[in-house]
Amino acid sequence: MRAFIIHLVILAVTFNYASGQSRIVLDGPRHIDTEMRPLVLVDTFTTDINYLVLNPQNIESIDILKDSAAISRFGQAGKFGVIFIHPKAGTKFLQIDRILNDYNLSNEDKNLSVYVNKVLMQSAKLLLIEQSEIENVEVITDNTISCDRFVNIRTRTNDKTVNNR
């Protein structure tokens, strides 16, 4: 279990030396057993590591609970461990409903599939994006992606979220 959580944290935070910017890479089910994911708590939000967009410079600290400590505090939800990400003061997060409202999408468009940097978010309700990381939210018509119209949330650096493929 300890190795799994350490592996998860290493996958989640990487550094991009070419651009001089650090970034969070959310490397999905290819590497992480989707049945054994830890509970992820960011500030007051519950999310999944694959649905988090966060500038690592805005992380104050990260705490990890595992084994019986996680289960005794969070029950079965903590059976694979718990990752607490404590952001720096003033860091604001948005969930999908707030994003769609803030960007004035029509009620019809709010029912479209949600993508982040043109990567489909299967469970958009889990999305948690640092407000300052959102560059644009738009409805796109694109025949190269499986659906004709979708909501695309473009983040400041497109490679901050990498795929759930």
Image (spheres, helix red, strand yellow):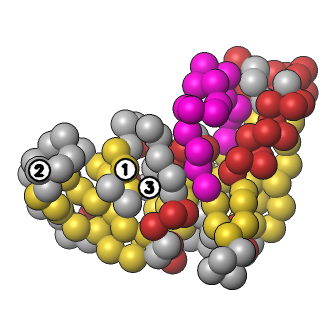
CA neighbours of label 3 inside 10 A, class few (<14), some (14 to 19), many (20+): some
Quickly name the residue at label 1.
Answer: 119
Q: Please name the residue that numbered disc 2 is placed on.
A: 143
Residue 136's place in the image compared with 74, above or below, is below
**In the picture provided, is 42 more to the left or to the right than 139?**
right
- Residue 38 lies, in percent from the top left, at 70, 32
- Viewer-nearest of discs 1 and 3: 1
Q: Earlier in the sequence, mark 2 or mark 1?
A: 1
The residue under label 3 is 95
> Dot 1: few (<14), some (14–19), or many (≥20) neighbours within 10 Å?
some
Let me know if residue 135 is in the magenta part: no
**What span is in magenta?**
25-40
Q: Nearer the N terminus, badge 2 or badge 3?
A: 3
Front position in the image: 69 or 33: 33
Asked whether 20 or 12 is in front, the reply is 20
Q: Rounded to the nearest whole Å, what is the CA distance between mark 1 and mark 3?
A: 17 Å
What residue do we see at 47% from left, 75% from top? 156
Amino acid, disc 3: Gln
Helix, strand or loop status at disc 2: loop
What amino acid type should be assigned to the residue bearing mark 1?
Val
Amino acid carrying mark 2 in the image: Asn
Residue 97 lies in what quarter of the image? bottom left
Above or below — where is 14 with respect to 45?
A: below
Which quarter shows the C terminus?
A: top left
Task: Provide the major secondary structure of the magenta segment.
Answer: loop
